[in-house]
Amino acid sequence: MARLANKARLAVLKKALRDFRNGFLGAFRYFITRVRHGFLSAVLFTSRLIRLSITKLRATLKYIARARSPGYMYYRHPLPIRIMHWSNAVFLTLLFMSGLNIFSAHPALYWGKSSYRGVPPVLEIMGEENDDGRVSGATRILGRDFNTTGFLGASKNREGELTVREFPSWLTIPNSLWLAMARRWHFFFAWLLVANGSAFVTYAAVSGHLRHDLVPTGHDARSIGRSIFDNLRFRHESGEAAKSYNVLQEFAYLSVIFFLLPLIILMGLGMSPALDALRPGWVDVFFGRQSVRTIHFVVAWALVLFVFVHVFQVMITGFWNNFRSMVTGYYRVKSGGNHG
Amino acid sequence: MDRDGRITRRGLIRRLIAGTGLVGLAGCEKLSESAWFPKVLGLGEKATHRIHRLVVPRKAMAQEFPARDLSPEFRSNGTSMPNNPTYVALAEKGFVDYRLRVGGLVERPMALSVPEIRKLPSRTQITRHDCVEGWSAIGEWTGARLGALLEAAHLLPHARYVVFRCADPMEENPRSLYYESVDLEDAFHPQTILAYDLNGEPLPIKNGAPLRLRCERQLGYKMAKYVMGIEIVDDFSRIAGGKGGYWEDQGYEWYAGI
């Protein structure tokens, strides 16, 4: 059975490839004659060709996605959302890792307008090598010391030796402590994050994604109790109900998109002495520049926490189905059953 | 691969993800050390410079603080005692022989002693010093307004940058002296001063005696300590590493507004 299905699938793929090759050669010859006729028609033709290839590609992806599936395939994530989702994942990862490298230049956090007010920092990462050559790492939070050897303050380097180091080298970009380079990475991808985020919010507002999928409906709001209860028991929607987000998902996504990300960007801007001059004292709304830096750091870890919970949820609610839906767009809806 | 030994789609994707992770991490390191990629990354900071100059008004003032926000002690960073015989000799005699040389693209080159600098139009301000490392300290600075000094020297029409020549060698090589540069927009900003007092006392050596730059809308590394000379130029590409400052030559961005 399975072999037959595979054979049939292979035949379709082969045919698609053949069509593509023939079509491409024909299109190329046609394109050359069109170029002779004029630039505009060539542009029109190219755009038509691109659209056609997207349709073909989508049909192929849909075909692959449908394999071995009871139920039916539901087109859950349109292409722009998928592109922006993965771009966001890459940008945030690079920002986080280069951010840890920048933080390592002065691994302490303060509350208030400056670092030196006669009060100790709220958080401090410390590493030391004592006279016997024993290396240890500690983190002091609000005056209490925690032994964090192996992760904060001291961790293993590439050669496997325990060395004094704020964050493990595998977690920072670049791996070595290199403030100037880390700043380049950070500020480059910060611009891309802002561009991607703005594009997402615009797209979500215009396409209706925001209204239809993200803003809780009255029904969603009423189901909050049940949703919390279900989530605590790791029971999740399946079948038709899994096509839309539940109220806790909506809340999590909305708070990341409209609270955590804008806040971390604003706090990043607040650390700039030039932008602080835009309206002198605006950073004091957030308790001063050093508090702004602390908030930037805390929100970064809140986003990491979100990613962990998000990936965990993706895994326990059918990893491949979810993952595929964010790659190809297609989500398999199982027949029958609201709660499976 | 599945039981029949065929490569499955899932297996492939799984390996692809793991592979991308590893290659990605090693790649970031390779890219950082390449010649071209840091230049691409640098476009981010170049864009920041352009946009800050567009958004922040020329005369926008950095925040000033009440005396209660002063840091109990103003931290010294980088050099705290220049390893330079000429400087040490000047410091031992209380800088009485010190002369600030103003030259380059000016009509009237000058050599000013500390008492002469103290007679120039001055400004006192309590501002926050933000280091590129991440810390901030608040101090009260009194100094000669750089704009007034430059007006007295009469800049030539093609003057574009003010270069600060300092006394502190940064490496073993005694000629690797610290230097910095700012453009005329920052040079003529009312809060840009050559500070000689910190918290009401003569500037201590650890903070840059006898004279340090305050350029309040940028990070600490722009604010050269131990300033010995001011050189007006139209282009800094022929000075030292050509990037306009000691730290800039080490890869830091010339514009330090963020």
Image: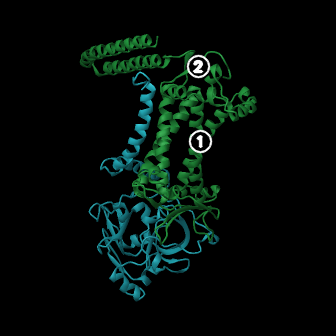
Chain colours: A green, B cyan
The tag earlier along the polypeptide, 2 or 1, is: 1
Residue depicted at x 49% and y 30%: A82
Q: Position of residue B85 (x, y in %)?
A: 33, 83
Question: Is there CB contact under 8 Å for labels 2 and 1?
Answer: no
Query: Label 2 neighbourhood size at 10 Å, few (<14), some (14-19), many (20+)?
Result: many
Q: Position of residue A263 (x, y in %)?
A: 59, 47
The amino acid marked with disc number 2 is: Val
Query: Label 1 neighbourhood size at 10 Å, few (<14), some (14-19), many (20+)?
Result: some
Q: Position of residue A216 (x, y in %)?
A: 68, 30
Disc 1 chain ID: A
Of residues A1 and B149, the one drawn nearer to the viewer in this rendering: A1
The amino acid marked with disc number 1 is: Phe
Instruction: Identify the mark at residue A31; answer none if there is no mark.
Output: none
Please name the residue that numbered disc 2 is placed on: A333
Q: Position of residue A116 (x, y in %)?
A: 58, 69
- Image quarter of the N terminus of chain B: top left
* Displayed quadrant of residue A144: bottom right
Please name the residue that numbered disc 1 is placed on: A306
